[in-house]
Amino acid sequence: MTAPGMSPQALHGCFVTGTDTGVGKTHVSAALLHWCAQQGWRSAGLKPVAAGTTLIDGQRVNEDVQALRQASSVRLTETQVGPLQFEAACAPQIAATLERRLIDPATILSAARHLARCADVVVVEGVGGFCVPLGPEWDTADLAVVIGLPVILVVGLRLGCISHALLTAEAIRTRGLPLAGWIANTVDPDMAHSEGNLASLHHEITRRHQTPCLGVVPWLDTPTPAAVAAHLDAVALKRVFTASLL
Ligand SMILES: Nc1ncnc2c1ncn2[C@@H]1O[C@H](COP(=O)(O)OP(=O)(O)O)[C@@H](O)[C@H]1O
Ligand SMILES: [Mg+2]
């Protein structure tokens, strides 16, 4: 993958990845957009690649794109938030192939550059886990490198999440990206020993990466951006975003 990345001065914000698909990346990204707006910053969401659209009132919409657009404080179109949307709800490379389309880094960079001009902070939601193929020669880890923002790792609290979190953190660091912090999100309200798992995550991530926990989100009946944001650590987040804004 040889596409040039964003200039570090051009884009501020974070890249949100997760231990897997369905771990709460969209909810956390929307909460971060909401939180940034509360700080008085113009916030914009970007879902560079979105697979899975439904037809609503004659328009194809993707849930993640909609959620990020609604949580952004800047008024954006669906295409500005989701420049590459595919119909099939499956692995993005497969969804793109079904439509005989390519996932082109230039399209994503152009969308990111536009958002960088109209917002103070851009929250980019990754696709699936950290290393999902986007074409024969590149994947979502390359995408994170091209975007070049500090990475926030969402850990979906469920059995197996400790190894997934540690492997993902290692992959982020191996790509030379700053791991700005991690957020634990309760995706299994009946998880046994969730406190023990959390303690182990705290210990192991700190020991290996010296990076902070930015929040522990419980299972919420109504996980609105504001409700999720209420469980984030404002002091730690301020440090992450202020460092990016400098
Ligand atoms: N803290 C939470 N409380 C309640 N439901 C949650 C929570 N986090 C995630 N969910 C649910 O889990 C599913 C996956 O969340 P989502 O943010 O879409 O994950 P991802 O973006 O990683 O695929 C959604 O149906 C969402 O409503
Ligand atoms: Mg999502």
Image: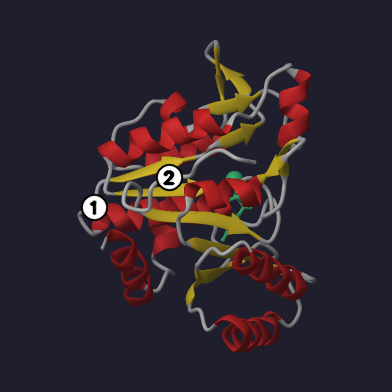
Looking at the image, which residue is at 71% across and 34% down?
92
Left or right of residue 176, residue 161 in this image: right
Across and down, in percent, residue 72 comes to 35, 42
Label 1 sits on what residue type? Trp
Q: Nearer the viewer, residue 12 or 161?
A: 12
Q: Quadrant of the C terminus?
A: bottom left
Question: Can the viewer see residue 20 in this picture?
Answer: yes
Left or right of residue 149, residue 3 in this image: right
Vertical placement of residue 168 versus 120, above or below? below
User: Which mark, residue 6?
Assistant: 2
Query: Is ligand 1 closer than 8 angstroms to the Cβ of mark 1?
Result: no
Query: Is ligand 2 closer than 8 angstroms to the Cβ of mark 2?
Result: no
Q: Residues within 10 Å of mark 2 (few under 14, many from 20)?
A: some
Q: Residues within 10 Å of mark 1 (few under 14, many from 20)?
A: some
Vertical placement of residue 172 versus 202, above or below? above
Q: Quadrant of the N terminus?
A: top right
Please tell me whether mark 2 sits on a helix, a strand or a loop: loop
- Image coloring type: secondary structure
Residue at mark 1: 41
Determine which quarter of the picture holds residue 238: bottom left
Across and down, in percent, residue 61 comes to 55, 24
Label 2 sits on what residue type? Met
Determine which quarter of the picture holds residue 204: bottom right
Determine which quarter of the picture holds residue 97: top right
Q: CA distance from mark 2 to mark 1?
A: 21 Å
Looking at the image, which residue is at 52% across and 84% down?
210
